[in-house]
Each structure stands twice: as C-alpha cells, then as structure tokens.
Amino acid sequence: MVSPALPVDVPSQPWTGRFDGDGAEHRRWWQAVTPYTPRMAPAATPGPRPAVILGFGSDAGVRRNKGRTGAAAAPAAIRAALGPLAFHLSRGVHDAGDVTVAGDALEAGQARAGLAITRLLDAGQLPVVLGGGHETAFASYLGVAGSAAVREGLTVGVLNLDAHFDLRDEPVPSSGTPFLQMAHAEAAAGRELRYAVVGISEPNNTRALFRTAEKLGVDYLLDEDCSAEAAQAFVAGFLAQVDALYLTIDLDVLPASVAPGVSAPAAYGVPLPVISAVCRQVAASGKHLHLDIAELNPEFDIDGRTAKVAARLINTLLA
C-alpha cells in the first residue's frame, strides 16, 4: 500500500553546498538528500531505516513563553549547515519539507506535524524533525503516540537533552509546557510518561518545577554533574527501561559559547563532547524511534555556530 501524502506546507527545496565531484567518494549531504514522496513501506531487511527530515517552522510557543522569537527560521538554517557536510552515512536521507505555524495557530500546526510524523513512522522511516521552539516536542509526541509502535504496545521513553524541564503548568501551551502536556496525555491514555532529562540547570528551574518532576517520576541529571561517565551511565540506565526512544535535543543544553543562537543561552551548559557522546550512545542502542532538535534561533547565532552544531549532532545520530 502506498503511504498517504504528508500534510506539509512547504515542499522540500533544493539543497546546496560545495561541489567536489559526482562520485560517491566526493559526496556531500546536499548531493545525497532526495525529496520524500509517499511510497511503499520499506521491506523489513537488515540495516538502518531511511531518515526523513521534516521541518517544524514555529516560534509561537516561544512567544507564548516570553522568550526570544526567531526559531521559525531554524529548519532552513540547519539544512544550510547540513548541506556542505561530507556524507558518510549508510542510510538514505530524504527531505519531506516543512510544516509551518502561521501566527499563533500552534495547536493546529502541532496536530499537522504529528500526523506527518505518524505516517513516516508507520511507513518504516526514521523521522528527524528540525524545530522550531521546543513546542516541537509536543508535535513529536503526537506523532509517536499515534504510531503503530505505541499501538502495538512498545514502551517508548522520552530522553530530553535540555537545561529546562519544560514542565510548566500554564493555561496556554507553550515551549515551556510540552512534557507536562505529554504526562497528561499519557495518563488519559492509561499509560505513564517515561521521561528523563540530561543537563538540567538548577538555577533556571524553580522549586515548583522540581516538585512537578519528582511527582511525575522524572529522572534527571544536573548540568554540573554531566561528566562523560555520569551521562553515559544515566542514559544507559534509561535505555534499559524502554523498548524504543524518542530523543529531543534543546540546543540551550550547550554552553552559550558553543550555542549562542538560542532563545535562552546557558551560562553553564553541558560540554559538546558529552552531548555528542550521548548521541552516539543513542544511535548505537538501535532503539531510537524518532529524533528532533529544537530552539535554534538564527537571528541570534554567531557565524552560524549553533546551526553547525545542530547539523553535526544530526550527522552523529544518523551515522
């Protein structure tokens, strides 16, 4: 059966980058990525699933959360940073285009992105969502929760690399509420949210947020405790509890010197080598079901530094 069309607003656009030749030995991302089109689900053969990039152009959630807006431009900036990278992957990579949030229509945009993600997952693809503010995470959750993986009973964990819990209890959803929204949705479905965070900044999360995390049974590792060994042990422990993993990366988990182009730059942050090692660990586990990366704000980036970091992490996760 052919997969149904995805509800995207902007179709995939041509990628660009340096040209060194047409041969496989010269290939870069811009030469390797092809447009995604609905087709037969891939056969269940050994090897990595094809990855499909989906942009989520939104900063409505950041605006509601009183942050620095501009993340809606992030998908294009990350693609521009990915394009020139040498392509060493053993999987195919396709681009499905963007779901965009017009004005304040966040919930409608999240629902459309969620539907696209469900269709990609059910077609045997590995979705890679380029946010967008961290309201991207609830769109991702809708897609994962609606997928066959959950319908068939797999235990899916949510691993967040982030300086913030994003468990705010607010009357209106925002970039600060997605994981509390997930907890409520899971409870309504008769399930319990399995949620863990690497990189929590104690000074940037109130006591109320820590209490909410404790009430929900959230596992977390503080940024000051994120040595390579501690992070690896923490992630290994969480991976052992789940059948599949949804990994979400908020780029403000990194120090401001590494990731200046975010809504809320980190004064401390987790070193990039530690975050990269966690990405390699997740990739090696074979449990990663869905990936997204959020909070790049190109307006505040310096020399494309944050976009390049986002591109490098995506490349690591797909290698």
Image (cartoon, rainbow, N blue to C red):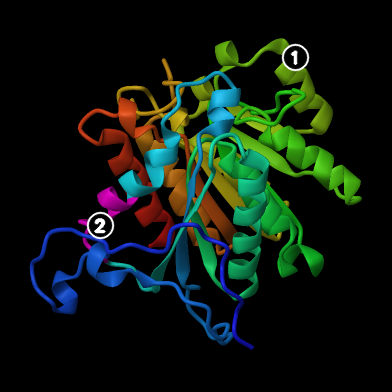
Identify the residue shown where x is 54% and y is 28%. 62
- First reached walking from the N terminus: tag 2 or tag 1: 2
Q: Is residue 230 above or below residue 43?
A: above
Q: The residue under label 2 is which amino acid type?
A: Gly
Identify the residue shown where x is 33% and y is 62%. 13
Category of crowding for the residue at label 2, using alpha-carbon neighbours closer than 10 angstroms: few (below 14), some (14–19), many (at least 20): many
Q: The residue tagged with tag 1: helix, strand or loop? A: helix
Q: The residue under label 1 is which amino acid type?
A: Ala
Residue 261 relative to residue 145: left or right: left
> For the residues carrying marks 2 and 1, which lies nearer the camera in this image?
2
Residue 31 image position (x, y, % from top left) = 23, 69
Which residue is nearer to you in this view: 167 or 283? Answer: 167
How many numbered dots are placed on residues in this image? 2
Q: The residue tagged with tag 2: helix, strand or loop? A: loop
Q: Which residues are magenta?
A: 79-87
Residue 268 image position (x, y, % from top left) = 42, 18
Residue 234 image position (x, y, % from top left) = 60, 39
Query: Is 83 included in the stretch rendered in magenta?
Result: yes
Residue that label 2 marks: 83
Q: Please tell me the numbered disc located at residue 231.
A: none
Residue 123 relative to residue 224: left or right: right
Q: Is residue 270 above or below residue 244?
A: above
Which residue is nearer to you in this view: 170 or 310? Answer: 170
Query: Is 249 included in the stretch rendered in magenta?
Result: no
Q: Please tell me the numbered disc located at residue 208.
A: 1
Identify the residue shown where x is 38% and y is 40%. 73
Residue 13 relative to residue 160: left or right: left
